[in-house]
Amino acid sequence: MIIAIAFPGGKADTETIAFQLTMPGLEEEPFYRGVLLFALDQAFTGRKRFLGVDWGWGAVLSCFLFGLAHAFGFSDGHYSFDAVTMALTALPSFIAVWLRLRTGSVLLPVLLHNFGNSFSLLG
């Protein structure tokens, strides 16, 4: 949602809105807040209780990797890295991790992700 506010989109067609309301969260959240978080939490077992959940290095690393995946780009034969995009995706992903840890489900992270991606398109 922060990215949507910082970089408002133009008029979106129905297909773009439908895509943003469904696919990004369905594609990314089961991996980043599901499989990757689980694997990293198994590898790094230390935990600290904060905001009602037990945080581990898996949460931090999965958010960092989520940011990295969004910050790297390739266009016209060149790679790029955008630190602002990394920060604007990695930091809010902690909310998704908290929701996942608090509820034990990826449903709310999926809904949050899709809302965040489509926020600037609606209206």
Image (cartoon, helix red, strand yellow):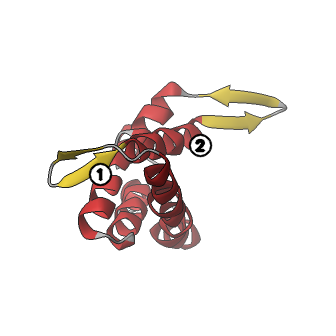
Q: Quadrant of residue 122?
A: bottom left
Residue 69 badge? 2
Quadrant showing the C terminus: bottom left
| Residue 113 to residue 69: above or below | below
Left or right relative to 84: residue 56: left
Residue 100: image x %, image y %? 33, 63
Where disc 2 sits, the SS reads helix
Disc on res. 87: none
Compared across the picture, whether 29 is left or right of 68 comes to left
- Amino acid at dot 1: Ile
Residue at numbered disc 1: 95
Which is more toward the observer, 70 or 21? 70
- Residue at the image point whose x is 29% and y is 47% from the top: 55
Numbered disc total: 2
Please name whichever residue, 32 or 83, is drawn nearer the observer in this view of the structure: 32
In this rendering, the answer to whether 92 lies above or below 15 is: above
Q: Position of residue 60 (x, y in %)?
A: 39, 40
Pointers 1 and 2 in contact (CB under 8 A)?
Answer: no
- Answer above or below: position of 24 versus 5: below
Which amino acid type is marked by label 2? Ala
Residue 8 position, x and y percent, is 42, 45
